[in-house]
Amino acid sequence: MREKHRMRILIGTILIGILGVLTTSCNSKKMTDLSKSEFLTDSIYSKYLNEYRKHNVYLPKGFDSENEYPIIYATDGNSSLTEKKNLLDSLIDNQIIKPLIFVASFSNNKIADSTSTTTGDGKKVKLSYRNFEYVERKPMRLEDSLLVDRFQNHKLYFTKELITEIEKNYNQEIGKTDRYFYGVSNGAGFGLSLLNNNPDIIGTYICFSTFGGDIQSNTWNENVKYPNLYLRYGSDEFFGLKEDSEFLESKYAESNSFIETKEYEGEHNNEFWKKEFSEIIPRILKFE
């Protein structure tokens, strides 16, 4: 009996030791995870677009869901435009900007129309679903029925599904002032449309080399306080971008809203967009 009792004690001691090792291992893994930033790829099902949509999420080192963070929502998640991990790590680690969450939404690059659009020299242009998600085109043919509401449905996905799901998953109870938008080219055009039609969702927009957005055909109300806007375009880009910039400056002045515009020396290129992004972010998300 005594021998059996000793065996029970020995087995119990071994089990406690094993559990202790496992617990220590789990805690160590948790601390390891918290000691570096993460760049994740995830997806959600969009009922508005009737498909799964991918997005990237950057979480800063030491992320704690009990704390609140500013969030930058970006377009073109499936490109080098939004691979900001190294840049954000450097800015945060050196206490230049406050820790933040960066979310980059993937567009749908599946070919949607390969027949109806041509360039000036008569060549056919293959338009992807992305072109109809970021720019409010008005296809009229019966065979384009899936594209007619693509822009509006994508906007509903972005505002009612992506933003809502991200802030729910990461326990972020933030408001307009802690939400930021970043986009370039057609992605920036989508941002300008969102800014104009839904000014109460996101507080600050960073839009570079904006193509689309119906800037001069949209209604701008002088009684509406529009989100802060940082607009950039290149000296070697289409001259219409300068006209759009001047138009927006006048409309923002009428509504007493904040806008900062700049013509950089360069063209339609990520090299310049990266430089401008790196200059703006430390000013608007300054570490305190």
Image (cartoon, grey):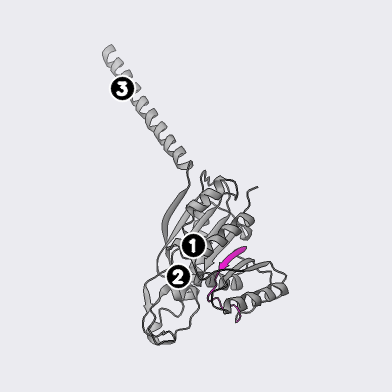
Name the foreground residue: 232 vs 154. 232
Q: Nearer the viewer, mark 2 or mark 1?
A: 1
Q: Residue at x 69, y 76 (%)?
A: 250
Disc on the earlier residue, 3 or 2: 3
Q: Nearer the viewer, mark 3 or mark 2?
A: 2
- Image x and y of residue 208, in percent: 55, 68
What range of the chain is rendered magenta? 203-216
- Image x and y of residue 148, in percent: 45, 80
Q: CA distance from mark 1 to mark 3?
A: 51 Å
SS of the residue under disc 3 = helix
Instruction: Identify residue type, mark 3.
Output: Ile
* CB contact under 8 Å: marks 1 and 3: no
For the N terminus, give its image quadrant: top left
Q: CA distance from mark 3 to mark 2?
A: 57 Å
Instruction: Identify residue type, mark 1.
Output: Leu
Q: Residues within 10 Å of mark 1 (few under 14, many from 20)?
A: many
Disc on the earlier residue, 1 or 3: 3
- Residue 24, by quadrant, is top left
The dominant secondary structure in magenta is: loop
* Residue that badge 1 annotates: 162
Q: Residues within 10 Å of mark 2 (few under 14, many from 20)?
A: some
Q: Residue at x 62, y 79 (%)?
A: 243
Q: Residue at x 43, y 63 (%)?
A: 79
- Image x and y of residue 162, in percent: 49, 62
Instruction: Identify residue type, mark 2.
Output: Tyr
* Residue that badge 2 annotates: 48
* Residue 229 seen anywhere in this rendered image of the structure: yes
* Residue 1 seen anywhere in this rendered image of the structure: no
- Residue 252, by quadrant, is bottom right
Tell me if 257 is positioned left or right of 238 in this view: right
Could you say which disc has been placed on residue 11 in the image? 3
